[in-house]
Amino acid sequence: TYHTSLWLVLATDVTEQRQLCKELTAKNADLIQLNRLKDEFLACISHELKTPLTAVLGLSSLLKDKKLGELNQRQSRYSQLIYQSGQQLMSVVNDILDLTRIETGQLKLTPEPVQLQEVCDRAYQQAHRQLFAGREKDAATIPEIKFSLTIAPELQAIVADELRLRQMLVHLLENALKFTPNGGEIGLQVNRWQGWIDFTIWDTGIGIPESAQHLIFQKFQQLESPLTRQFEGTGLGLVLTQRLARAHGGDISFTSQVGQGSKFTLLLPPAPPEREASRDRVRSNLEPNRLILIVEAVPQYIERLTGQLQKLGYRAIVARSGTEALEKTRQIQPRAIFLNPLLPLLSGWDVLTLLKADSKTKDIPVIVTATQAEKLLAQQNEADSFLSLPIQPQALQKSLSRLKALPPLTRSSLTILHLHGGLLDKEDSEFVTKLGVMVNNSTTPIDRLLPLDYRILEANDLDQAEILAKIWKPDILLLNGQKITNPDEYLQAIAQVESLVRLPLVTLDAKIAESGNKISELSVFPCLIPITEQSMVAFLQVIQVAAGVSKQSNILIVEAGSECYQSDQCLRETQDSQIHAGIDFSHALTQYLQTAGLRSLLAQSWTEVYSQIHHRSVDLLIINLGESKDLDCWLEGLKQLANLTVKPPILVLEHDSLAGTGNRELNELLSQLATKVIVDDSQSMPELLTQINQMLV
């Protein structure tokens, strides 16, 4: 028999596809050119308008202020209207110019340390003055709106372009004032969250209609509603705020309900991208990313999912359209994305395809939220997971628990630049020798988990340090600082040296750490324990965290006596003095641990404790029994904690007044749960810190 080989040849004519590709490329180039010409035209027209507008404003100001003679009532009213209209038109021109500069890449930020209290106060005053200009003589026409400003105590400054930061806050505060009726309230809250500075502007105003929420970041959009038609505006303020936020490396999000008010959240990094870029590696490993992007157009779904995520220890930002979702994903790099395919402007399925095709966003998990009928379509479009609407809490927890851990940064060696505050003496030389021997011969558990070679460079002064930093490109700047007489002045000098200011600063002295934290340009990582063989674990951990090769340990503190842990009955039986005793100590401990370079947080509820443990976000749980003698109502929370399958190390702090309490069930639970028990009245904070560092290994 003969075997004949058969060949199957398939041919496809791609001539038409190639021609179509060429046409699309040409049209795309034309669109880019047209967009550039449009920006140039707007910029040219805006500049040409400013000259005559300046004259109109100047002359009408002279008329309305009666600098050229007395006017009758009608003339006075007309001059006032001319001046106000001129101001409004000048505002439009300035906004168009700013937008044009941003979109053509011509806007240059001037980052500098900005005092938060000052910039927030000035922004409110400017917003109030601009909105109610001309009404000063008739105070009755100015609505009475209560304003509150709250800034977290640990926040003093941010590195930003002060003019542009104030411009963003003015736009947001002006909107809050504009749409809040007489007797209402507005507020500005500034907090630190997950490495971001969070500006939240809220109001009790008329709110934004659901049908218009996806449009407010579009140019020249104004709410067409009987409630809002009475208010003037350019339709550019929020667009400009969004663009300026992104120019700073941040973004803006909001939630709103008609008749109840709005809340805008402006997230900014501690420094703009140009200065922040050298620290991205460090910051990404310091903070576990718990920022979630919700892509949804239905307000009730947004509100419900946001609340569920907050209870699980996450923070949500919102995108209401497909184009906004793409922009925010690339800008913020969230931990995960919850995506509803039903979106305006761009379909959610197209968003999913574009995200998975982009190398910068393809690894971000996308969880499609839709009806069960669309589950198969979600799988076909390469969604990472699917949740049926409305989202149930258990299903949400299960979906989040599947999120892949962020890949750790791997390194084989670290270079440490050890800077002295003066000439080396005998004591310094002995310390340097001992440090080098201990670091390079370390066999600590943490070093076995992440074996590294360490190179230690020595510098007596800033000039030497600058030269060594340029040559050797160190990863860490280590500063002992015990012999520095003026820490503030010395650290300011470090901040002026370009090759040193970009380095994470590990300090062994509390005064140096305190001074360094006041300088926003410096990234300070304190290690406030003596460097010995016994403390080498803690020292190397701080070094590795600062270098970005090891994550920062997360400590969750639970204190007895806090209202959020107790039932209503127990709350009524607990005295105020008993409540605050434990809380005051826990607040002091939290601040001390943060100063020592450890990430610590006071839990707000048992739900948060269980959730954080479930998501493996806790490296050490500290239970502070406080000084309350009525702990029966705490038993339920401890029982549920004992039933958890996986638990972190647990450190129990007792006070002398509670040691050996007669509550047998409580004692049995604590002995079952505790990895270690410390009577904290007998320990100083540094001693307690040493114990904590040992438990974190």
Image (spheres, grey):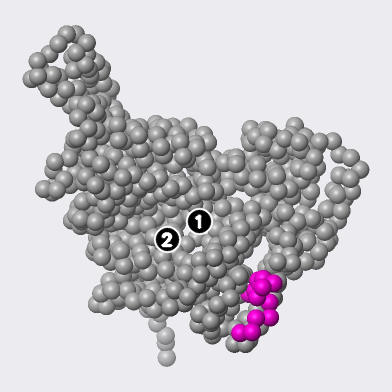
Q: Are marks 2 and 1 in contact (CB under 8 Å)?
A: yes
Single out the residue that lies furthest toward the bottom: 1
Q: Amino acid at mark 1?
A: Gln
Locate the C terminus and report the quarter of the image it occupies.
bottom right
* Residue span colored magenta: 650-663
- Dominant secondary-structure state across the stretch colored magenta: loop
Q: Position of residue 414 (x, y in %)?
A: 72, 53
Single out the residue that lies furthest toward the right: 426
Q: Give me the residue at 35% from left, 47% from top.
A: 187
Which label belongs to residue 194? Answer: 1
Q: Amino acid at mark 2?
A: Arg
Which label belongs to residue 552? Answer: none
Q: Give me the residue at 52% from left, 52% from top.
A: 195
Mark 2 neighbour class, 10 Å CA radius: few under 14, some 14 to 19, many 20 or more: many
Q: Is residue 209 above or below residue 52?
A: below
Residue carrying label 2: 315
Q: Is residue 438 left or right of residue 660?
A: right
Q: Is residue 559 above or below residue 60?
A: below
Locate the N terminus and report the quarter of the image it occupies.
bottom left
607 and 109: which is toward the camera: 607
Q: Is residue 532 left or right of residue 660?
A: right
283 and 63: which is toward the camera: 63
Q: Give me the residue at 31% from left, 36% from top.
A: 127
223 and 606: which is toward the camera: 606
